[in-house]
Amino acid sequence: MATLNLNGKDVSLPDDPRTTLLDFLHQHLSLFGTKKGCDHGQCGACTVIADGKRINACLVFAFQLEGAEVTTIEGISEGGNLHPLQHAFIERDAFQCGYCTSGQICSAVSLLREINNEDPSAVTYSQSRDGEAAMKEDISERMSGNLCRCGAYPNIVDAITDVIALERQ
Amino acid sequence: MTTHSAKTIGTPVSRVDGVAKVTGQARYAAEHMSDRIPLVGWVVSSDTAVGEMTSLDTKQAEQADGVHAVITYKNAGALKPFSKPADESRFTQSRAVLNEPYIRHFGAPVALVIANTLEQARYAANLVSYTIEGKTPDLLTEFDDATQKPASLDGGFEADATSGSKPSQSDIHASIEATYTTPSQISAAMEPHATVAEFKDGKLDVYCSVQIIASAVEALAITLEMDAEDIVVRSPFVGGGFGSKLGLHYDATLACIGARYLERAVKVVLSRRQVFYNTPHRGHSTQQISLASANDHTLLSVQHKSAMPKAKGYEFAEATGAGARVTYKSQFIESSHRVKDVDLPLIDSTRSPGDAIGSLAFESAIDELAHKAGVDPLTFRLKNLPVVHPMKGTPFTTHHLGECLRQGAQNFKWQHKAQPTPGKKIGHGVASAMRMNVLVESSAEVELSANGEVTVRTDMTDIGTGTYTILTQIAADTLNTSVDNVTVKLGDSRYPASCGSGGSFGAASSGSAVKKACEALIKSIKGSLPPAFSHAEVQISNGQITLVPTAQSDNEEASSPILLANFMSERDFPISATGKVSDDDTSDDEQYSCGAHFAEVEVDEYTGEVRLVRQYGMFSAGQILNMKTATSQIKGGMVWGAGYALTEGIHHHTDTASFVNPDFGEYHVAVNRDIAEVSVDLLQEPDYAASPVGAKGIGELGITGAGAAIANAIFDACKVRVRDFPITMDKIIAGKN
Amino acid sequence: MQPFTLHHFNGEKPLSSLPLNKTSRFLAGGTNLIDLMKLQVETPQTLVSLAKWEKANSIIEDDNYYHIGAMVSNSDLAKFAHSQPRLSILAQALLSGATVQLRNRATTAGNLLQRTRCYYFYDTTKACNKREPGTGCSAFGSMNRIHAIFGTSEHCIATHPSDMAVAMIALDAQVNTQRANGNTRQIALRDLYHEPGDTPHIETQLDEDELITHVSIKKKPNGTQYYHKVRDRSSYAFALVSLAAGFKIDDGRVKDLTLAFGGVGTKPWHPHKAIGVLEGAEPTPDVISQAAEAELSSAKTYGSNDFKPELLRRTLTKVLLEIAEHQVKYPGHEGALYDNA
């Protein structure tokens, strides 16, 4: 039977091939942490991590991820302990309504890995400002796939900056 | 010995719902009732703006896989006609849809297809065929076509107002006349409007995403011709509202119609494109502004005329001239608003109705005049601040605009410009913000258990504003306990009716109700105590309720702390009390929150591309209840201001009265990289004339003026004044040529 | 979304075993196709998923070429190009497009074949010759801010939205394909796309049963490179005007110029007239202006995109002058104009 691995557990793929990963989570697994903001890859609220990479769950059919390891917001905190980013988001008030937050956090978890891997971003190649402003612009660019209508962007960048600083200590 | 809990009001307490939100456990409307396996409804949207439906065929859709029903005007059941009865407010009037073969606007629902799964419903929706005999839609394209004078404006303002006398030509040293335009805009909350409803035994159980619960119940009762007692509406978490969820929308009506038809739970989530058409947007505006000042830079004349569309059959017009009437004193002030009835989707509140777009135009125009007069725009503003209301002469409860401008300029380093990036010009801009404050009737209940647990209940909502947190703080502080000893329950129509979230009135109104409920609870406890304890303080900690003597306690009997359990038995618990605020709790004087916005931008010398460097604001909004959530809300407003200045706008397809860009790909909400440094300072100045908790509104203050500060910074950088928002690079280039 | 029959292609069974026809589509990452299927803009009856086509997921180098597998993700390609100074422009273009999330799913071949983002193509209530041949073009006389000025016809003025393809056009990439009958061929990317003419629904010269297997890019010097994308947001927005440029300065003159435009053409635009003026010339503002005029002589504007010629002129001037300045400062430089890595 075709499965994918979701937050460490194998789950059977849906029968209807039209089912996106996002609708699969909602309709078949009653896992609602991953949000639908646009359903067309234009907002990032549905960001999850598949085989170590962040993707929009709305623009992938569940069957395309057969055999993949998928982590959603429900799988981010291990054993009930909040991820450092989750702590930082609370401390920095990096959300208001909370609807984009799952996607922001999944995105930020991947961002930490991408920065550690020295993956380039558009800011790598842009006319840069100095020091801290450049680093924050780089985080902003990397987080631009996640809209936040409450306008928590500066706090999101601060939360991520805090965790990066913590990791580098 | 009981320790006194530290007061938390004004401190940066982290959100009490923070863990739920960062772990994905907070449940929004569409995520409820999953145990009841709701059927899924998908809306068939009209491809025509306005007209009679002449054919409708649902047979194919009904026979499609998994489909349970296709609801149309033929089988939707009893519904009160849209916007009836006329004497109800627009949030309690009927929100009927599918009640007649008539389409009022493009994208309006033609049918609801209900199936087992989303995939089935969405596909079958394509199988519904219909024809609409379309009429030429009415739209507003010319300023002069807006001739209708609205009965009143949002916020209770009169459409027209004039004060003072026109200055003589010889007194005028500088003057400007300019026409500003702002585009149609949409709230675009991240959570699309969504409802899941179940109809069982004549009773309706509804979860929907709405800012005001009590009027939602009323609207459903009126629309579905039911008793309000048979309806429960819940909205424990709302994924953003910004005005678009003040009232109910078609997702709610349709889910309820479907649930009633099938006697099953039915879920309707609007697609993002449907949100653009089936929930309100802000109308586009044209604002003609004339200003004149004297030799000494005294403002002599302010004239502001506004033209906007108004959706047919729906009473809403916004007061774009509100800022022009109150921000600066002037010998002569004249403000008028005209509208034209149009065949567009609902036009209603979007964050800071009136001031968000009024300030874009007016604060840009003020800047124009300052430059024309040859005076620093900050100096010009400071020169013309009012002491009393410039038109009415009535006093303000508090007014700290001058302090915000002066102190803000210092903190921002108004006079000091950094070295720009090579190839770019740098600019600074400033703008004032004035946002009216109101207190709205609101009730809350507080309950105390024998072991000292406090529970607050009100149908108030938390749309991201931090209501859960501030109500927790208010209850904790008033009852002398810690925040983790208080549970706040919101968003349930079975709880006491509140003001709901909107118009920046939520925190002060519902917070004051909670404060009064807690005070009533203390009074009720003291009522059952010997008189000696009348001055004792009730304190709650470690599961115990204690009476602690205060300085005023002079009675020996009450000279040391004593457990309440000595006077009351467990059977007396829980003790509860309610609190309510109304007009009586607020002053008749002018109430405004105010602030000063500053922005620094860089503009590319060749391409006209604008890059924000920083935004800064200093604000006065009475008692700040929670420094963290308040600051965040203000920053969020400033981010909206950036979007309004630089990126946002609906393009109209005029032939079809539809929108060209109804999605997040082309309606450009600011992204993270559009925003740079945003910082905020808040004055702490409790205004008890405004509300019992001393707080005033902040939700709309942050956006008011924020965009104009950016527009003014762009002018400062490249000497191009763009009067047609948003300010995109092509308009800057056009100004350079 | 219309129901479809699902097939898989893993590169082992021949393409001929699959029902490939007018109503079938290959599904690579899906970031564009699934988007369009939800809106009924694309209504395939058969989907051939390429998710298990492992072989197409690698980049192979030989002495003269980089061979990029069809299924290599935009993220992986950007990271690879980032490591190759000669391909900097490709890395820059890729990273300016979409978001990390989308680039992690989007593939090399899928990116080349993505459909236009024209508002009216996406809106099934509007006439669109590309979506439904013969219905008309709604972009004429309406908002057409994002529309093309080069290669347009009275039937269609939609732009090709890719950034990656702009860089690949500049780099003269070659597209390699395979047919159901086993035949393979190589097509210059500059020849892959059709201008709309009176058949805007036919966008490339690929046949229904033809699958892109890889893209080959010649190893050659490209000098100082810069991809500048002018758009309505600073990120996550399609180009109004974009420009891929790279050259060296040799004896004060432009050498090895690679140049392409995005956001302005019905296909990723290869400005051969501008290149003709610039190659071997001194990159002065006057010469750049002549180059812009040479190319713009064939441009047509349609109302709300009237600003594009001037924006293109200005962007071209800015970028070429900045590159020239860099080359003068660092003679023989090969790589990104700005590099904060």
Image (cartoon, coloured by chain):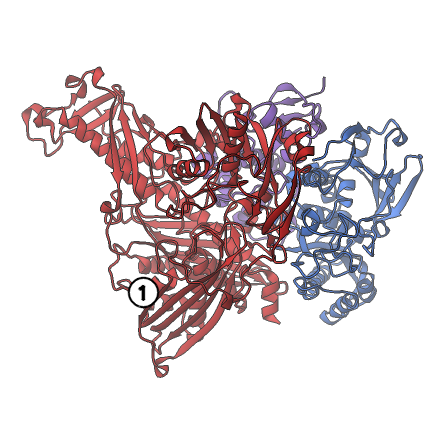
Chain colours: A purple, B red, C blue
The residue lying toward the viewer, choosing from B557 and B588, is: B588
The residue lying toward the viewer, choosing from C339 and B531, is: B531
Find residue B478 and report its horizontal and vertical position in percent: 24, 34
Q: Is residue B3 above or below residue B181?
A: above
> Which corner quadrant holds the C terminus of chain B?
bottom right
Which residue appears farthest toward the bottom when viewing the image? B170
Find residue B506 and report its horizontal and vertical position in percent: 35, 42
Name the residue type under label 1: Leu
> Which corner quadrant holds the N terminus of chain B?
top left
Find residue B408 and report its horizontal and vertical position in percent: 37, 57
In the displayed structure image, the side of residue B657 where residue B332 appears, left or right: left
Residue B673 visible from this viewpoint: yes
Q: Which chain does tag 1 point to?
A: B
Q: Is residue B64 above or below residue C177?
A: above
Find residue C99 and report its horizontal and vertical position in percent: 64, 43
Q: Is residue C249 above or below residue B56?
A: below
The residue lying toward the viewer, choosing from B617 and B669, is: B669
Q: Is residue A164 above or below residue B560?
A: below
Which residue corresponds to mark 1?
B385
Which residue is found at the position 46% from the left and 50% from the top? B350
User: How many marks on residues?
Assistant: 1
